[in-house]
Image (tube, helix red, strand yellow):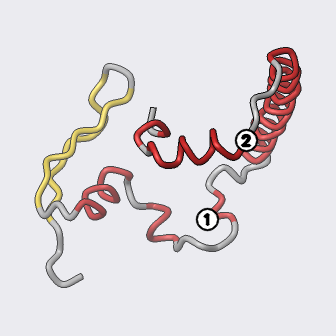
Amino acid sequence: MALFRFRWLRKFVRRHTTPIPQNVAFDWKAKLSIAYMLITWNAVGVVLYMCFTGRADWPKYYGLKTEEEANKKPAIYFAELLGIKKAHIISYSGVHKKDDFEYKKDESS
């Protein structure tokens, strides 16, 4: 646990707080777990709603991504992001090879 690496923080918290009874702690744990479940359920609902209404790629939908960036293959995007100058890219769909090509970064861009 990362919290216990900071001994000074643990001592500070234990010095300035009082222990709570176990039954109160269990009650709060139950209340917080219900709140967490409701928040998570709503977040999943929002994500599914965005996907079903055609806004799964929200940067493209709101105009934050150009057409060139939207049409770029993910492998090329990540190669540029990682600074890879030359790569052999193989794309699979299921167990069948879909695409196979060499990627070379343009030095002009």
Q: Which residue is mark 1?
A: 60
Please give the count of numbered marks on the rendered protein: 2
| Image quarter hosting the C terminus | bottom left
Q: Which residue: 62% across, 55% down?
A: 57
Q: Is residue 81 above or below residue 11?
A: below
Q: Earlier in the sequence, mark 2 or mark 1?
A: 2
Q: Which residue: 45% across, 71% down?
A: 68
Instruction: Say which of marks 2 and 1 sits in front.
Output: 2
- Residue 72 screen position, x and y as percent: 40, 60
- Residue 77 screen position, x and y as percent: 34, 59
The foreground one among 108 and 1 is 1
Question: For residue 17, which numbered disc appears in the image?
Answer: 2
Q: Is residue 93 above or below residue 6?
A: above
The kind of residue tagged 1 is: Lys
Q: Which residue: 61% across, 65% down?
A: 60
Q: Residue furthest bottom?
A: 108
Q: Is residue 75 above or below residue 39?
A: below
Tell me the crowding category of disc 1: few under 14, some 14 to 19, or many 20 or more residues within 10 angstroms, Cα based.
Answer: some
The kind of residue tagged 2 is: Thr
Q: Which residue: 14% across, 79% down?
A: 107
Which image quadrant for residue 73? Answer: bottom left
Q: Is residue 92 left or right of residue 83?
A: right
